[in-house]
Amino acid sequence: MLETEPLQGRDEDAVASADFSSMLSEEEKEELKAELVQLEDEITTLRQVLSAKERHLVEIKQKLGMNLMNELKQNFSKSWHDMQTTTAYKKTHETLSHAGQKATAAFSNVGTAISKKFGDMSYSIRHSISMPAMRRK
């Protein structure tokens, strides 16, 4: 039974380096050469058809006012929307939002504590200036 799996690594190298031409009759060689020429012609034709279709595509896009920048914007918008609808994004957004709220509260508390400390220091400085005994030291 023949294997249907594609050739892998060393198998490809072994087949590429093998010389099968000695196993073929002259008639088989001629048939293979003819098939090779036909395949090369078909590939050339397909490349020409593809090129013509790509030019036609560009013409249609120009007529519709589509350009690369618009396509990039549309692709980015769609990708951004698709990403925002994923569960992972939603969970991450929730977590970061919650963390941001906690950080804001913490900074607010630190700011309040610093303000209170400066207020206490200001009172202490004013009080020490008004006391004559403190001035002599």
Image (tube, rainbow, N blue to C red):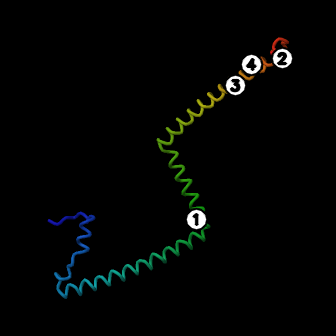
Residue designated by label 4 = 120
Disc 1 residue type?
A: Leu
Residue 68: x, y in percent? 58, 65
Q: Which of 56 and 117 lies nearest the eye of the viewer?
A: 117
Residue 129 or residue 104, whichever sits in front: 129
In the displayed structure image, the side of residue 82 where residue 64 appears, left or right: right
Q: Is residue 113 left or right of residue 82?
A: right
Residue at figure coordinates x 21%, y 78% from the top left: 19
Q: Earlier in the sequence, mark 4 or mark 2?
A: 4
Q: Secondary structure at mark 1?
A: helix
Q: CA distance from mark 4 to mark 2?
A: 14 Å
Q: Measuring 55% from the left and 55% from the top, which residue is drawn there? A: 76
Label whose residue precedes the other's in the sequence (4 or 3): 3
Residue 29 lies, with reference to residue 126, above or below; the image says below
Q: Which residue is mark 1?
A: 68
State if disc 1 and disc 3 touch (CB < 8 Å). no
Q: Nearer the viewer, mark 3 or mark 2?
A: 2
Q: Residue at x 24, y 74 (%)?
A: 17
Does residue 24 appear to the left or right of 34 in the view shown? left
Residue 58 location in percent, x, y?
55, 72
Q: Which residue is mark 3?
A: 114
Between residue 62 and residue 115, name the one nearer to us.
115
Name the residue that disc number 2 marks: 129
